[in-house]
Amino acid sequence: MSRFLVVFLTSCQLAGGIGLGPKQAPPAPPTTTNTTANTTAPTNPGDPPPTANTAPAPADGGGLSRITVPALPGSARDSTMIVMPTLKNMNRAQAEAAVRKAGMKGEIEFEFNDGPARSTEVCRQSPSEGGQSMAHLSVSITMCTPDVVHEQPVLAGLSPAAATAKAKASGFTGKIEVLPLSEYDASCKADTVCRVTPFRWEINQDPSMQLWVNKKVAITVPD
């Protein structure tokens, strides 16, 4: 009888019935905490983290950067139609003042092609000059590096010696030759340079430069 009871109890334990000890509850599922931040995750795993719309200007003044001027208070409901002024070649302060003077009250976004230190002139704007926009809308202005116009030193009209010295002082390192014109040029004064070849000699890509002068003309007086 005792032997039968032991077998019976063992069978009940295996079947989940009556046990010798208290029945243990199944383990509870792990709890999770919602830690999702109020940010936008990168599209791809390798993408950099999201940044604000306004990028601070780099300290060294180089590289693409943006600066946003905030909208004027109370401008959100102003739907007045404004005609955009011409901003080309203005500096940042002049452009901002011109936009506000015209009546635009929204944000003004400045984009610098090569940093604020170098990009000092307006080269593009949106809305374009003469275009109409509601006063509360934003204005986009692109600042570019000013075009530096390099004027080649003028050698024509100088004496050959003066022209040679000026060319060397301007950086020309090649050979300088003084040659006579094949035909007399009445518009060119005697002992002065009439023309120079190559035309763009200041690029300093040619091994030599030619200073052309009038050839000497023998004048005979009849007896």
Image: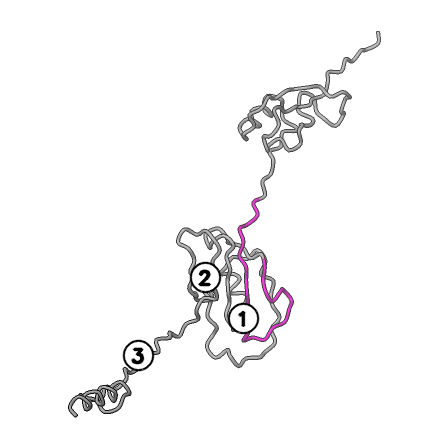
Q: Which residue is mark 1?
A: 138
Labels 2 and 3: the sequence-earlier one: 3
Residue 13: x, y in percent? 24, 87
Left or right position of 207 against 105: right
Q: Which residue is mark 3?
A: 30
Q: Is residue 133 magenta?
A: yes
For the residue carrying disc 3, how many other residues have a C-alpha within 10 Å: few (<14), some (14-19), or many (20+)? Answer: few
Find numbered disc 2 in the image and state the secondary structure of the residue it sits on: loop
Q: Amino acid at mark 3?
A: Pro
The residue positioned farthest toward the left in the image shown: 2
Mark 2, mark 1: which one is toward the viewer? 2
Q: Which residues are magenta?
A: 124-148
Left or right position of 201 against 93: right
Q: Which mark is residue 47?
A: 2
Find numbered disc 1 in the image and state the secondary structure of the residue it sits on: loop
Q: Which mark is residue 59?
A: none
For the residue carrying disc 2, how many other residues have a C-alpha within 10 Å: few (<14), some (14-19), or many (20+)? Answer: few
Q: Is residue 210 magenta?
A: no
The residue positioned farthest toward the right in the image shown: 223
Q: CA distance from mark 2 to mark 3?
A: 31 Å
Query: Closest to the observer: 184 or 199?
Result: 199
